[in-house]
Image (cartoon, grey):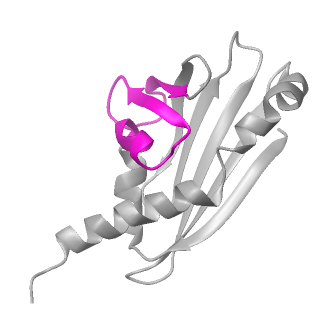
Amino acid sequence: MPLLAETTATVPASAEAVWAVLADVEARPRWHPRLQRAWLDGPLAPGVRGGLHPERTRPVDLEVGVVQPQRRLTLVGVHGLPVARGTYEHELRPLGDDACEVTLRMRVDGPAARLVALLAGRLLRAWAQPGPLQALGALARERDARTAPSP
């Protein structure tokens, strides 16, 4: 499975808050500017289907892969006919109570993976950039601030 892009950032928010933002698939456009819309047809669990509507493209069918709360989330999108699958990996590594390292990876596989990587690689690589991680971190910090106990 060719790796198209990977980025890692430390965000000043708890792993619990980062996970809560990641797990809210419908809210993804709030932190990822490449998305117009995202949805699931059920609760976040392996095998649940839904979709992503990236900017400048048609909607992509989506299936939830791995769900390990506060550790790992994998979403698999089918691009066009089932000739290429994009795997969007999200890994979290807690760094204490108020920081978390987040890694985003974009991989493509399937019969036309090389062609898709060649033709749309630049657009797909834009999925794993530092900007969305900073926005994810900002939403997670807001969540931590809302759930912090009052002094």
* Quadrant in the rendering for residue 48: top left
Q: Which sits in the foreground, 64 or 33?
A: 33
Q: Per the image, is 88 magenta?
A: no
Measured along the vertical axis of the image, is residue 105 above or below residue 70? above
Q: Residue 83: image x %, image y %? A: 77, 15
Measured along the vertical axis of the image, is residue 145 above or below residue 87? below
Residue located farthest toward the left when viewing the structure as drawn: 151
The residue stretch that appears in magenta: 25-54
Residue located farthest toward the front when viewing the structure as drawn: 56
Measured along the vertical axis of the image, is residue 130 above or below residue 13? above
The reply, left or right, for residue 125 in relation to residue 129 is right
Q: Residue 88: image x %, image y %? A: 62, 42
Residue at 60% across, 32% down? 76
Q: Residue 41: image x %, image y %? A: 36, 22
Residue at 46% across, 30% down? 36
Q: Residue 92: image x %, image y %? A: 53, 64
Residue located farthest toward the top when viewing the structure as drawn: 81
Q: Which sits in the foreground, 48 or 148?
A: 148
* Quadrant in the rendering for residue 59: top right
Q: How many marks?
A: 0
